Image (spheres, rainbow, N blue to C red):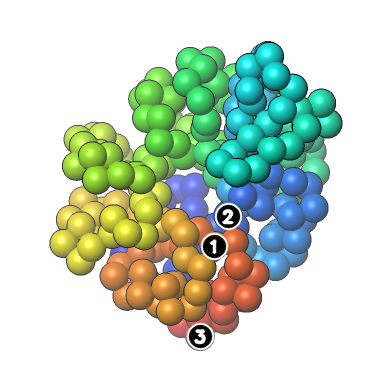
Amino acid sequence: MSHPHPALPDHRPLIVAHRAGNSAKTAARAVKRGVDMLEADIWRYQRRLEIRHLKTMGPVPLLWDRWILAPGWAPRLDLHHLLDTTPVDTRIMLDLKGHDPMLAPSIVKTIRDRQPDRAIIMCTRYWGHLDRMKDDAGVHRIYSVGSEQERATVWSRLEAMEHPAVSIHRELLTPAIARRFADLGVTVLVWSANTRDEARLLLDLGADGLTVSNGPVQDWLLSERRSLR
């Protein structure tokens, strides 16, 4: 726990606002609350970098996710707008979606052209995106782990990193896995904690930070951090 990471503050616990970057309104609210990082889902669609969790349906003008349907013709938030409407020192963990090989390079070019002082932080379960950027020291990579197979195969990538970091599903973090992360100096973010009890358990296991959507739990984590100072 408490491994230094060049893109993240030294205090613990770190607080990541789950999907808060997916709208300007929730981003502003999370920034005001004082979280350490916004999470935003990003796709490359028709050469646009769109911020959304919902998926497209090919030629059908609808967006979907599980049991959710939304009109595909409504205006969509893009990366340019998210950058322009958040302070440049706001950390945004971009969760890369889909398999477009130009997604990661397009993100890097957009941020560097528009806001060269903004930290570039990428997280994804599609690890090929991060592997493409491994030689760019200015891109901070966080490998997302959401299955037992991913947990079993992520180690070689972490071992090769100067500043290894993961975002792991809460059900996959065990005491043994937490100890192994600690031995490698891995910064461990866990998604997602929905209650104080879940948050406390994950922090006790050794999580450096938590991805949280619940505002009262975020506030509790902020108070916990203040009490540790």
- Which residue was labeled with disc 3? 227
**Residue 196, image x, y percentages:** 49, 78
Give 68 or 79, whichever is nearer the viewer. 68
Give 79 or 169, whichever is nearer the viewer. 169
**Residue 30, image x, y percentages:** 69, 60
Q: Residue 212's mark?
A: 1
At x 46%, y 39%, the residue is 123
Viewer-nearest of discs 3 and 2: 2
**Residue 107, image x, y percentages:** 60, 26
In what element is the residue under mark 3?
Answer: helix
Q: Amino acid at mark 3?
A: Ser
Query: Marks 2 and 3: in contact by CB < 8 Å?
Result: no
Q: Is residue 121 visible?
A: yes
Viewer-nearest of discs 1 and 3: 1
Sequence-first tag of 2 and 1:
2
Sequence-first tag of 1 and 3:
1
At x 51%, y 68%, the residue is 194
Sequence-first tag of 3 and 2:
2
Q: Residue 18's mark?
A: 2
Q: Is residue 112 visible?
A: no
**Residue 65, image x, y percentages:** 59, 39
Q: Amino acid at mark 2?
A: His
Query: Marks 1 and 2: in contact by CB < 8 Å?
Result: yes
Q: Residue 66's mark?
A: none
- In this rendering, the answer to whether 160 lies above or below 90 is above
In what element is the residue under mark 1?
Answer: strand
Locate residue 68: give its quadrant: top right
Mark 3 burial class by Cα count in 10 Å: few <14, some 14-19, many 20+: few
At x 40%, y 36%, the residue is 125
**Mark 2 and mark 1: Cα distance apart in space:** 5 Å
